[in-house]
Amino acid sequence: MEYAFLAMMGWCGTKWPGWWRGPRPPQPDPWWWIVSIAGAVGGIIAVAVFKPVIGDAGFFATTITAFAGGILVGSIVDGIGGLTNKG
């Protein structure tokens, strides 16, 4: 159940407000799903990596770590996908 929660927080980290606004349109549908799944995996991995540092800091610290991991991994994957965008 903890992994499901961490994946959910990582998934939420990929959709930063205003992600569809800006200089370029969002990627086509399959790419958007890849970015979201990568963010979910990034949330789980971030908490697994930083668990010794977080320790027993509590629910909020774990949530923020998973969210930040989702943002980081989702942004990296989206950036790689943006390199292939010719639009």
Image: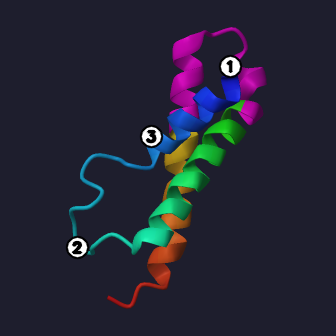
Residue 32 image position (x, y, % from top left): 45, 64
Q: Identify the residue position indicated by label 2 in the image.
A: 23
The answer for how far apart the CA atoms under marks 2 and 3 are is 22 Å
Q: Please, what is the three-letter code of the amino acid marked with disc 1?
A: Ile
Colour treatment of the image: rainbow
Density class for disc 2 (Cα within 10 Å; few <14, some 14-19, many ≥20) is: few
The answer for how far apart the CA atoms under marks 1 and 3 are is 20 Å
Mark 3, secondary structure of its residue: helix
Determine the residue positioned at 68% across, 23% down: 2
* Residue nearer the viewer, 77 or 7: 7
Q: Identify the residue position indicated by label 3 in the image.
A: 12
Q: Which residues are magenta?
A: 48-67
Q: Identify the residue position indicated by label 1 in the image.
A: 54
Q: Please, what is the three-letter code of the amino acid marked with disc 2?
A: Pro
Of the 4 image quadrants, the one containing the C terminus is bottom left
Residue 33 image position (x, y, % from top left): 50, 61
Q: Please, what is the three-letter code of the amino acid marked with disc 3?
A: Cys
Mark before the other along the chain sequence, 2 or 3? 3
Density class for disc 3 (Cα within 10 Å; few <14, some 14-19, many ≥20) is: some
